[in-house]
Image (cartoon, grey):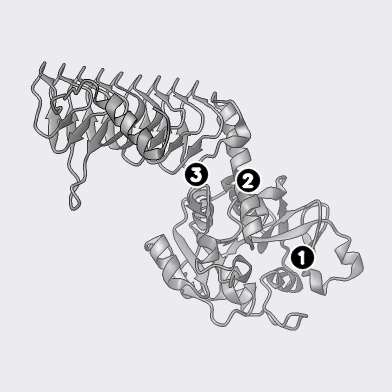
Amino acid sequence: MMERDLAIVVLAAGKGTRMKSDLHKVLHPIAGQPMVEHLLASAAQLSPARQAVVVGSGREQLEAALGGRAAIVVQEPQLGTGHAVLQAESALAGFDGDVLVLYGDVPFVRAATMRAMVERLHAPDSPAVVVLGFEPADTLQYGRVLAHEDGRIAKMVEHKDATDDERACRLCNSGLMAARASDLFALLHDVGNANAAGEYYLVDVVNIANAQGRSSAVVVTDRSDEVVGINSRAELAEAEAQWQAFRRTEAMDAGVTLRAPDTVFFSFDTDLGRDVTVEQNVVFGPGVTVADGATIRAFSHLEGARVGAGCQVGPYARLRPGAVLEAKARVGNFVEIKNAVMGVGAKANHLAYVGDADVGAGANIGAGTITCNYDGYFKHRTIIGERAFIGSNSALVAPVRIGADAIVAAGSAVSRDVGEGELRMVRAEQLVKPGWADRFHDAMKKKKGLKA
């Protein structure tokens, strides 16, 4: 087929009342990413020349979220799907390619499915319109696609306007459609609203094309789950579960071990290497990459972090944005890393906070250690040299630099730089009072009326 420019029109003008939210429906996240972004990411694989999003209320939210990547078109009032697509005509003025109509609340349509629709549009029989059909287990209130065996469409009808015989047809209309821009808008101008809802239906362009002696065709997806719409919080949760189940399988197929797959949650951009092991109850927030051979132990939470090859994280660890673990670094239980680099083989095995820091290769951070990075107004950085040893329960008051091979004694509060190879001990002098504790206990027992 000859390559033609492609435009994407995304319908997002529904009021989303069932979501009961101030956030626009298509901006509700699935796996940490707004559902409309999932859809646009798939569409991006077709390299569209133009993108338009048709909205009702919430225009400002969509404009802020999309940042100029698509023209925002307002449909007011909302008079049906055909009327909605027609509003995009001005945004696509001068465009002479193909148009793919998608729905912002149907986020899981695969790029391969979109491509199949566009390719069918340019098959030898040159259909005026291509519709994406599917066969769900329960046809519910979906419109029907009445098609011949060769895929040519005889008629399309909405459920509320269908006869009992037409409702017996199991091939349903997903709402997705492809057409040449010149055909699409010409047909839309002929759509009327003489139907049960008094709306301008997008599907009527097929019936109008048929009446003009032109054929339309249906492409049937073999995965009905990719065209399921999201209209409520419950359906949003189902979509999240659907996405997570797919992603877990994909990860395991790629060589990742998941000890308890149903308890691991990924984000849209989680990137795991080969032979990574993920134990139970691990959550990956956005922006995480894990290199080959790393182990993420149970009950850990990672976000905006890069984990190097052979690292160990957790259990019960938290990696926050900007955390970088270089090869074979170890972060243990109840350790939090934020905007900090743990060098090759560096360790913080338990009960530590390392924030705004650079920890050199082979350094050891003892239990209870914290980098005091915030003075109430500004963040400051801590530099810890290679092979340095930070004793337990130490406070490193930034900005401060600990030299290579230095030792900070347990319980120290370090506020000045420590040179290479130095020992720094910052403790109050120990005071010993023999017998004081015995006398104290005796006095307290008498006061409480207890026998000594």
The 10 Å Cα crowd at callout 2, few under 14, some 14 to 19, many 20 or more, is some
Counting from the top left corner in percent of width and height, residue 177 is at 64, 61
Q: Is the residue under label 1 in contact with that under label 2 (CB below 8 Å)? A: no
Q: What's the amino acid at mark 3?
A: Phe
Residue 16 is left or right of residue 44, and the answer is right
| Residue at disc 3, secondary structure | loop
* Numbered mark located on residue 143 in the image: 1
Asked if residue 157 shows in the view, the reply is yes
Q: Which residue is mark 3?
A: 268
From the viewer's perspective, is the residue at label 2 or at label 1 nearer? 2
Counting from the top left corner in percent of width and height, residue 366 is at 29, 23
Q: Residue at x 27, y 28 (%)?
A: 393
**Residue furthest right as drawn:** 165
Looking at the picture, does residue 195 appear above or below residue 8? below
| Residue at disc 2, secondary structure | helix
Q: Which residue is mark 2?
A: 241
The 10 Å Cα crowd at callout 1, few under 14, some 14 to 19, many 20 or more, is many
From the viewer's perspective, is the residue at label 1 or at label 3 nearer? 3
Q: What's the amino acid at mark 1?
A: Gly
Counting from the top left corner in percent of width and height, residue 45 is at 49, 47
